[in-house]
Amino acid sequence: MARNASLSGFPEWLPQERLVELHVLDILRRTFELHGFSSIETRAVETVGQLLRKGEIDKEVYALSRLQEEESDTKRETTSDAKADAALALHFDLTVPFARYVVENAGYLAFPFRRYQIQKVWRGERPQDGRAREFTQADIDVVADGELPFRYDVELALVIVEALSALPIPAFKLRVNNRRLAEGFYRGIGLADTAGVLRSIDKLDKIGAEAVAELLKAELGATDSQARAALALASIRTEDTSFVDQVRALGVANELLEQGLGELEQVVSAAASRAPGSVVADLSIARGLDYYTGTVYETVLVGHENLGSICSGGRYESLATKGNRSFPGVGLSIGVTRLVSRIVGQQLAVASRSVPTAVLITLADDDSWPQAQDVASALRGRGIATEVAVKAEKFGKQIKYADRRGIPFVWFTAEDGSHQVKDIRSGNQTAADPASWAPPAEDLQPLIAVVPSTP
């Protein structure tokens, strides 16, 4: 984080840091909307039963005891299990609440439904660099009613590359794999517990190849040759479609493997054409969550791999169901707080000033306050952020106030009604008209600039 917080895991930003976060959010929002994604917001509270539907992650859930007490006063539960499922907690991601949202509002949504969602989430884990207990995520998903064409997997990769490329961050790599490819390969070499193999391979970056091989043998009964084959698959990384030949060279035949190869080839081929160098076929990417069924994505910042994935997701065939209806989808989630914490903590980008104000209107005397407000209204009406001094101190003190606040321009009104504006950085002072004067474009609002890296 940029500074130590008084309550660990709950970041708070200084004004200039918050400007960086807002800049990131504005870019994401604008990019998502340019691609036709609609914004939604879901409630912060879900039942524990809903939150735990897709995996055992109860240690991450923040329960809400007071709300639960109020709910218990109005409902009679018959079993302890029912009470536990009905307990209320803060959501720990945006995907599970979105699944509920789709089911409950299916009659009001036009499918395929293109959604983006930017909200805070809460997760009960040990705070560390890149991991907070309260943080903001930005998700995009496309969900269909019945069948979702694979082309959306390709489109979402390109949307995310476009969004991340516009952010003030270092180079990144969107690492893509396909669960069908991996599962088909594991079956082809005789490993039936494909979910178990995926969970072991998912630990590759953390514990290394030798430790993963031992896990495969000790926990899944893999032979030495099976473990070597699984690791050989996970070692393949290419920025083009040459991974297809590399996989086939391993000599494993399986129908599901071929389907996954074909799907991953589509994603990487499109990315190599439209965003060369940004997307990598990385066959070590597994994603531990069981609901992913096809394409999986993870994204790292080049030179900041220790931060972990800043954007991840994948395809799920039946995250949401309603009777005999199934709602398949594909989506990605950007860890906004994780990104911003690294940007401001290592000063990868900085705001040009800490306040939105571009102009301070000075007061020659206290009676001039109404006229100063008239000038400020004229400037604000043209989109220029303006403050009015609160008292008629010496001009030097008013200028020092503007300098301390980071306000670049100071406005003076003479007794004859003429106006002048001073750039307090350069000292240049010129005549100005409230109806037409405007600061240079780069001073109209705070800008976020990427800080050049030192060699």
Image (cartoon, rainbow, N blue to C red):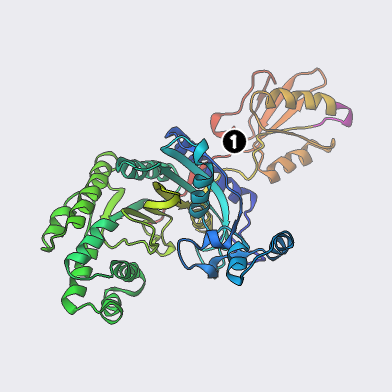
Residue that protrudes farthest toward the bottom in the picture: 218
Nearer to the camera, 411 or 303 = 303
Secondary element under disc 1, as helix, strand or loop, is loop
Q: Is residue 319 above or below residue 388?
A: below
Q: Report x, y in % for residue 218.
A: 28, 82
Q: Establish if 9 lies above or below 413.
A: below
Please state the extent of the stretch shown in magenta in the rendering.
Answer: 363-368
Task: Check disc 1 and give the amino acid type.
Answer: Gln
Picture residue at 54% right of the left edge, 41% below the top: 40
Label 1 crowd bin: few (<14), some (14–19), many (20+), radius 10 Å: some
Closest to the observer, 445 or 404: 445
Quarter of the image where the N terminus is located: bottom right
From this view, report whether residue 434 is shown above or below residue 181. above
Quarter occupied by residue 424: top right
Left or right: 26, with 436 as reference point: left
| Residue denoted by label 1 | 445
Write the residue at 49% across / 41% down.
Answer: 106
- Residue at the spot x=30%, y=49% of the render? 279
Q: How far across and how far down the image is residue 91, in percent?
A: 57, 57
User: Does the image show residue 123?
Assistant: yes
Pick the residue in front: 288 or 365: 288
Is 125 colored magenta in this rendering?
no
